[in-house]
Amino acid sequence: MSGVNVVPSHLNNFEFYLNGVKRPGVVDITLPNLEAKTTTITGAGISGDIDMPVSGHTNNLTVELNFRITDETALELGEVRAYDFEMFGAEEVYDAATGEYKAKSLRVMVRLLPTSVELGKLSPAETMDTKLTGSAIYLKVSVDGVTKVEVDKLNYIYNVNGTDFLAKIRKALGQ
């Protein structure tokens, strides 16, 4: 009976593409937190403050790319413009019913506006720990070909598990 007791295990590996070009061995990535933008409400009938999420709005979607060395890829990202990143991963899960590891595909797409490039340190026989930090204006996460999260800050899209929480807002705006 497959799928009854499936245990998520680990990311086996991933491929990194910058503007459509595969960049092997370059980077590890810290993906953004989906943190709701809130407004504080208070008033008659409310005992205190409530930080109310604003539908479909998020705080900054901060992404970090950590490079082993300060190579051409890291330096290129210092240009003030948007970059498209795509990561294809293989997540492994353990199926206790069959005793097998199974692979799920993970695809993450990000359009990033770089905000900081840390060039790192120079130390013999060590990594340089170069780091790029940026603001994602587009994020899409798919598992086995199914979109789980899509955030497009410039086109009023906030889709989680098939529900676009900004569809009503787009309609109200005449879009």
Image (cartoon, helix red, strand yellow):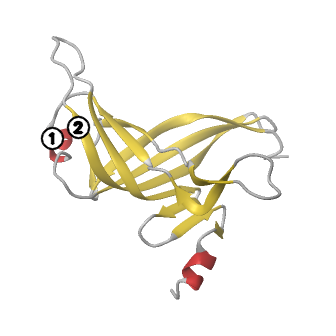
Q: Locate residue 94: give its quadrant.
A: top right
In this image, 19 relative to 142: left or right? left
The structure residue drawn at horizontal position 15% and vertical position 17%, both measured from the top left corner, is 122
Please state the total of marks drawn on the protein image.
2
Type of amino acid under label 2: Val
Relative image position of residue 76 (x, y in whole percent): 16, 46
Q: Between residues 8 and 83, which one lies in front from this camera angle?
A: 83
**Residue 145 in sight here:** no
> SS at mark 2?
strand
Q: How many other residues sit within 10 Å of disc 1, few (<14), some (14-19) or many (≥20)?
A: some
Reading the image, the residue beneath label 2 is 117
Q: Between residues 85 and 93, which one lies in front from this camera angle?
A: 85
Q: Depth-wise, is mark 1 or mark 2 nearer the camera?
A: 2
The structure residue drawn at horizontal position 43% and vertical position 42%, both measured from the top left corner, is 14
**Residue 88 in sight here:** yes
Q: Locate residue 171: give its quadrant.
A: bottom right
Extreme residue toward the top, this view: 124
Q: How many other residues sit within 10 Å of disc 2, few (<14), some (14-19) or many (≥20)?
A: some
Q: Locate residue 28: give its quadrant.
A: top left
Marked residue nearer the N-terminal end (1 or 2): 1
Reading the image, the residue beneath label 1 is 75
The structure residue drawn at horizontal position 50% and vertical position 71%, both measured from the top left corner, is 156
In this image, 32 relative to 56: left or right? left
Judge whether 100 appears above or below 79 on screen: above
Relative image position of residue 105 (x, y in whole percent): 54, 51
> SS at mark 1?
helix
